Amino acid sequence: MTAGTQDELKTKLRKKFSAHEVGEMCCLGRCHENAAFHVNGTNYSGTDIDSIDSICKKEYSTAEKYNVGNMGSPILTNTHAPFDDYYKIFVKVLQTDPLQCLAELKDSGLRGRGGAGFSLAFKLESCRNVEDDMKFIVCNADEGDPGAYSDRYVMEQRPHALLMGMMIAGYITGASVGVVYIRGEYPESVKIISDAIAKLHAHNFLGKNILGSNFNFDFKVIKAQGAYICGEETALLSSLEGQRPEVRVRPPYPTQKGLFNKPTVVNNVETLANLPFIMRNGGKAYSSIGTPKSTGTKLISLDGHFNKPGIYEADMGTPLRVIIDKLGGGFKHPVKAMHIGGPLGGLVPVSKIDDLTLDFDSFAKEGFLLGHASVVCIPEDYPLIDYLEHLFRFTAHESCGKCFPCRLGSTRGYEMIDKARTSDYKMDRELMDDLLETLETGSLCALGGGLPLPVKNALKYFDAELAPYFKK
């Protein structure tokens, strides 16, 4: 949308397909080069559209490529050892007391990389302490944030880091089933993860009494159906149970009563993929990287507005300026803001770049949210009022509908903005502030509750641009 490539893409598609054959899908994880589309179970982007005839004849494979690099300590972007050598980490884990493994995880200080930044060790310990004959480790691979494709990178380039991480989590908690919930818009990820699981079976790393350890574990891969709300952990669990994906009221928390009311740990791809490094090198080695409160590294997704778009790994605490200029190579053209952390993340004006470092606390202190660390740039010539209307429309479209503030508030929001944008109507700032407060405090989950953050950032930092749409 911000790159302005979709209209031309649709025009080219309609030369090959009739109008009713060209539908709509959410983010395909091709934010590094745009012009993304999906044909017959395969994703394409960039200049692929120019080969649409060959694609339809199944004579063409995507030419997708993106930069991958690191600055500091390469944990997730480092080249992995061959399969047998890499799984020596897991063999060692099976010979170690689960409580010792948990202690290493506590020492690491690893916090969830999906947005909330919650302690992984706390989650695993909470699940471990519940007595039950069935427990689950669920990987939330429903990476629906526009601009984010770091989880896709891990699943397709480092699948065994994720799978071993889930196996380690299962060993610590006593869980016997790992569920990988992958968004349907990532067909390549589904295939690669499924093939990696088959390889684990072939090498006897899954099933009953693995390597004579009395530990049982196996995987189930679920292909999601395109609902952004399923990125919220309780809606994801309802989806897995075959129910409407609605957010659940907490408590009880998933670690107590999760999937099928059994103790369940839900974490995202990047979080779980850190576990093999921690088990091999020790928790203190991991905590020595980054900052005291934000340990380790973070993957960053840079979009097509950068000179070197791609996936980069940097130590927590790295200045944002360094990431943009040295890793991303700077902007291709003038940019006025970056939406960091998905649609519910903070809208960061370029004037704040030098005030931020890559960690949870720096972003929170400045009134933003690190979240998934995905970066969507807003060019200087892109109307911010259009972007804000899109955020409200996105939330209204993706709301599960369970709570009124999200379902109704997001709709009222885009109606107000659309009216102000297309007529002489002027919005009342007090009414907008009331709407944002209602969304923020009354929504059951971060979809409605997080939407106000980028809107408030925009109202604060781009008052002059937005003033014509409000009453004086």
Image (spheres, rainbow, N blue to C red):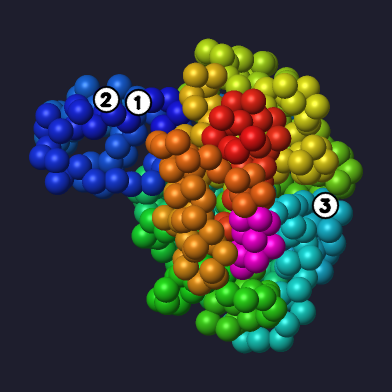
* Residue depicted at x 78% and y 22%: 354
Q: CA distance from mark 1 to mark 2?
A: 6 Å
From this view, report whether residue 240 is shown above or below residue 294: below
Of helix, strand and loop, which one carries label 2?
helix
* Residue depicted at x 55% and y 77%: 259
Classify mark 1: residues with Cα within 10 Å, few (<14), some (14-19) or many (20+).
Answer: some
Q: CA distance from mark 3 to mark 2?
A: 47 Å
Q: CA distance from mark 3 to mark 1?
A: 41 Å
From the viewer's perspective, tell me whether residue 177 is left or right of residue 278: left
Of helix, strand and loop, which one carries label 1?
loop
Give the dominant element type of the magenta stretch: helix, strand or loop. helix
The answer to which quarter of the image holds residue 128 is: bottom right
What are the residue bounds of the magenta stretch? Answer: 434-446
Q: Nearer the viewer, mark 3 or mark 1?
A: 1
From the viewer's perspective, tell me whether residue 332 is left or right of residue 41: right
Q: Tell me if residue 274 is in the magenta stretch.
A: no
- Provide residue 324's location: percent of width, then percent of height: 66, 21
Classify mark 3: residues with Cα within 10 Å, few (<14), some (14-19) or many (20+).
Answer: many
- Provide residue 113's location: percent of width, then percent of height: 67, 49
Front residue (pair 379, 253): 379
Type of the residue with mark 2 = Glu
* Residue depicted at x 54% and y 70%: 403
> Mark 3 vs mark 2: which is more N-terminal?
2
Q: Are marks 3 and 2 in contact (CB under 8 Å)?
A: no
Quarter in which the N terminus is drawn: top left
Classify mark 2: residues with Cα within 10 Å, few (<14), some (14-19) or many (20+).
Answer: few
- Residue designated by label 3: 109
Q: Are marks 1 and 2 in contact (CB under 8 Å)?
A: yes
Q: Nearer the viewer, mark 3 or mark 2?
A: 2
Residue 5 has which mark? 1
Type of the residue with mark 3 = Gly
- Provide residue 9's location: percent of width, then percent of height: 26, 28
